[in-house]
Image (cartoon, helix red, strand yellow):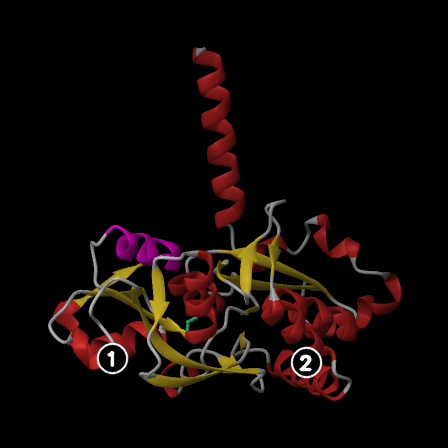
Amino acid sequence: MKNLKKILLAFVTTTLLVSCSGKNQKGNSNESDLSNNSNKKVSSEIVSDGVIDLGTSADFPPYEFFDDNNKIVGIDAEIAQEIGKKLGVEVKIKDMDFSSIIASIESGKLDGGIAGITANEDRKKNVNFSDTYGKSVQKVIVKKDSSFKNPEDLKGKKVASQLGSTGETAAKDTYGEENVQSFSKNMDAIVALNNDKVDAVVLDDQVAEKFAAANKDLKVLDKELAKDEYAIALDKKNDKLLEEVNKAIDELKKDGTIDKIFEKYMDK
Ligand code: GLN
């Protein structure tokens, strides 16, 4: 038993060490060997190790969520893979808290992030943003059996949001910082609402609709609090990557691929 504990501990420590080591130090791992030869030269011109590493927060259906096989799927995951195909570069998506994505790009652990990320002026100081590929508005979810009909009815009430999100900003602007409780994961905010720990959750509308569809006790109020546009966040030091990703997005918009991906996940 003791030995097993030791082995487990060693395993966890090694895994942690490996996953904490920065992207810049993983240059000689064999991951880059997976990209095919003909594209190798191009891929290393775009990203030094030949792999585009993107962060996401897979608690944001239909953009990113875990399927039954524990694989990250959704609109963003598919767009990212299509971009990879266009560029001939392998794309890897890693799950993390939404609030860590931009910092991980800045520190060089990631090349970018695709997570329904709203391109706003504040974030533009820290990352490049690709051309936009989606639109959203911030909405309020409440319990169906509550008396709240409009966002204004929640003045002075406890409202939840995801840490570091534009939903959090909209919630603080509307209800005051002291009334907003932030959670690392959207699911935890929804659970808090279900358990009456908070009166509402502010988040992106399509995601709010998915949560409400999966939970018969919840409903989304009509009126919006703010507007957002989604873009891929990219390493500010890599203009080549920005240029190539924008070219790919443009082609995927023109050939109908992005529309098709949206249709697939909006129907579900
Ligand atoms: N669009 C929101 C933002 O950029 C929320 C994104 C998310 O939670 N994945 O902050």
Q: Is label 1 in a helix, a strand or a loop?
A: loop
Rendered location of residue 222, percent (x, y) = 35, 80
- How far apart marks 1 and 2 lie (CA) works out to 32 Å
| Residue 137: quadrant of the picture | bottom left
> Is the C-beta of the residue carrying label 1 under 8 Å from the nearest atom of ligand 1?
no
Height in image: 29 above or below 145? above
Q: Residues within 10 Å of mark 2 (few under 14, many from 20)?
A: few
Query: Quick check: marks 1 and 2 in contact, CB under 8 Å?
Result: no
Q: Residue 200 versus residue 168: which sits nearer the camera?
A: 200
Identified at 48% across, 13% down, the residue is 3
For label 1, the residue is 150
- Pointer 2 residue: 259
Residue bounds of the magenta highlight: 185-195
Residue at 71 percent across and 52 percent down: it is: 31
Residue situated in front as seen by the camera: 165 or 188: 188
Q: Which of the 4 quarters of the picture holds residue 200?
A: bottom left
